[in-house]
Image (tube, grey):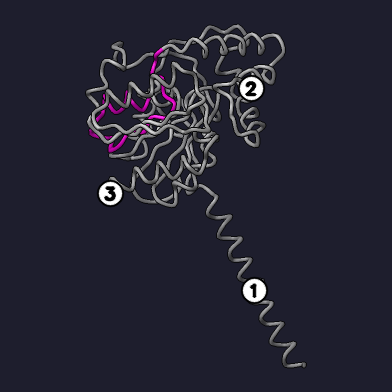
Amino acid sequence: MKNLSRIEYFISLHFIYILATISIQQTYAQTPDETRFAEVNGTRIYYEIAGQGQPLLLIHGGAVDNRAFDEQFYVFAEHYQTIRFDLRGAGRSGDRDSPFNNAEDVYQLLKFLNIENAYLLGISRGGGFAFDVTLEHPEMVDALILVSANMGVNVPAYHEMFDRATEAGKDKGARAAAEVWGYDPYQGPRRESAREKVLGIIEENMPRFRYFDGHEPVEQFRYSDQPRWERLHEIQVPSLVLSGAYDNEVARRNSRNWAEGIPNARLVLFEESGHLVNIDEVDKFNQTVLDFLENLQ
């Protein structure tokens, strides 16, 4: 019995060691390989990098920051060198205090990181910036993924909500603005378990995004004034267009138009998602993106 107890004791120690090792590995796996600031176009851009292989750059949308990709970043980093960052005026990046070009910020960030070729994934307005970089610097982009991207086309229901959120922010503060945005039937998350986190991210970013304090927004310009929809045919890289079935009708139509206008683009509709496809249907979104990129290898 004494020998048996000793064997059991050592087995227990070994088991504890294995559990501790797994825990350490999991903690390490959830830590960016690099967290820094890039000096880009007269401002500081916060970025995170994890993983190895072909670079995959994630570009978030409005009123949020890089945390919008929390449920993608480390999943994608298991397969690619994945980069997420805060756009100018969001998260930990510098303010939007002088005229600027978001797409040029993206391009200069890639140059700063010595990245010659990358896959670009942009959500909402981030999709427009990814599109612009692909047009202006096609030699740098190996694939383009547009998620709920309206690319400058007016969606009246969105602008009505933006105005209500801005007024709520002026009257009652950032939390009130975030609730208008976060409970919107199109822009808000449909996955209830994600709502509070999304509201928190919007609350932090909304004052800088919509200027509650009376500041006039600075000019944001593009490489070209030509509407993006007129240049869809110029995209010559493999492209994937993702859209939510519960997003606004105009937004869904926009996504269909992008998929039809970009040569050989593929459209995937997410049946349980609104605007925030990557948050509403996390597993399907992640697998759809990974499958698309894997088929390019």
Residue pictured at 60% horizontal, 20% vertical: 184
Query: Image height check: is 11 above or below 137?
Result: below
At horizontal 34% and vertical 44% (from top left) the residue drawn is 293
Q: Name the residue at 47% across, 42% down.
A: 284
The vertical placement of 29 against 209, above or below, is below
Gap in angstroms between the C-alphas marked 2 and 3: 40 Å
Of pointers 2 and 3, the one earlier in the residue sequence = 2
Q: Which residues are magenta?
A: 129-153
Crowding at dot 1, Cα within 10 Å, few <14 / some 14-19 / many 20+, comes out as few
Q: Which residue is mark 3?
A: 297
Residue kind at label 1, given as amino acid type: Phe
* Labels 2 & 3 near each other (Cβ < 8 A): no
Q: Answer few, some or many: residues within 10 Å of disc 2's Cα (few below 14, many 20 plus, some between 14 and 19).
A: some
Comparing 263 with 213, the one in front is: 263
Q: Is residue 117 left or right of residue 66?
A: left
- The mark found on residue 183 in the picture is 2
Give SS at disc 2: loop
* Residue 263 spot, x, y in % from top left: 23, 29
Mark 2 or 3, which is nearer the eye? 2
Residue designated by label 1: 15
Q: CA distance from mark 1 to mark 2?
A: 46 Å
The quadrant in which residue 3 appears is bottom right
**The disc labelled 3 sits on which kind of residue?**
Gln
Residue 138: numbered disc: none
Choose between 180 and 11: the one closer to the eye: 180
- Percent position of residue 99, x then y: 42, 13
| Callout in the foreground (1, 2) | 2
Q: How many other residues sit within 10 Å of disc 3, few (<14), some (14-19) or many (≥20)? A: few
Q: In front: 247, or 37?
A: 247
